[in-house]
Amino acid sequence: MLERNRRLSSMMLAITVVSAGTLTTSLQAQAAEKKGAKSKPAEKAAPKGKTNPEAFALLKEGIRLSGEGKGQEAEAKFNEAIKLHPGYARAYANRSNIHMMRKHYRRAIADCDKALSLDDKLGMAYINRSWAELALGQVQKALDDASKGIELEPKMAIAYVNRSHAYNRLGKTKEAMADANKALELSPNLAVALVNRAHTYVLEGDYKKAIEDCDKAIELSPHMARAYVNRGRALRCLGHYEKAIVDLDKAITIDSSLASAYYNRAEAYEKLYKADMAEAKKLGFSAAEEGKDKAH
């Protein structure tokens, strides 16, 4: 049963990342505030073979609901599992996914901390925490947690994606590329891994390969905003400003909170403006002859 539980927990992590793309768009429900909760000593993890069967059934149901994008219902199941079995580390780790999908990263970290206080060998808790830390800009912590997750779960592709992202943020593109490639070796159709490798290609100046990875990622997951951001950025760097703007518009439509999409779109517009002005002057345009319109 414990091994089956492990597989289900791993499935939950993969579903969350792939379906939400950047862990931002799948759920709209807001998590309820915890009121008046006093801290208690950490419960010991349940010995192997002694997981509460009803709690396990609730965990399984929560994973299913989360995979269907029903975050509020999934969270309720995880909460019930925790109520029945307060020492159920995997329930906390899976609940952290719900918090991440809502961008409640500090709550996600709190759940991962709790899970690890109960079971410090739970790889998915380190992996989930690394993603939340990346979102909060805690890059070195994210790198350390992703590395620990890889040590415990060496076949978990998303752990390599998280560490690759951390390496990119630290400017270590060689290490980032190695991890992105490993993630895709383990899971060739993991869209978020393709998007992350595309980011690395952009940083290395290999824009055509970045576009190829983004094309495939978009084919696999059409609503992954960062795939459009990375492709738009690569197109901008190649001088295809109008195409870049189309992609960046799409990214903003999917996720209006992505600052990088606005930045790259502004850069593309500026380059397009300069190119158009240069062409106008080349063709003999004269502002004086054209006259001023009311907008000026």
Image: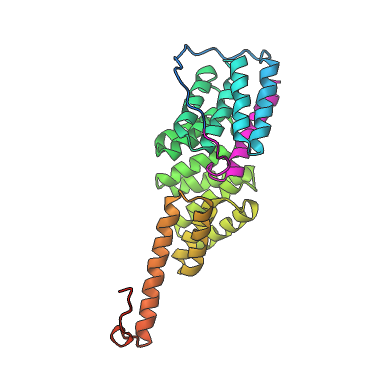
Q: Is residue 15 above or below residue 195?
A: above
What residue span does the magenta drawing correspond to? Answer: 1-30
Residue positioned 48% across, 46% down in the render:
176
Q: Quadrant of residue 227?
A: bottom right
Please, is residue 276 above or below residue 154 in the view? Answer: below
Q: Which residue is drawn at 54% across and 41% down?
A: 23
Q: Residue furthest front?
A: 294
Residue situated furthest left in the rendering: 288
Q: Which of 216 and 92 is in front in this view?
A: 92
Residue in view at x 47 percent, y 11 percent: 41
* Residue 152 seen in render: no
x%, y% of residue 272? 41, 71
| 26 falls in the magenta region | yes
Magenta span: predominant SS is helix
Tell me the quadrant of the picture where the C terminus can be found.
bottom left
Percent coordinates x, y for residue 167 in the rendering? 44, 43
Q: Which residue is at the front of the view, 211 or 22?
A: 22
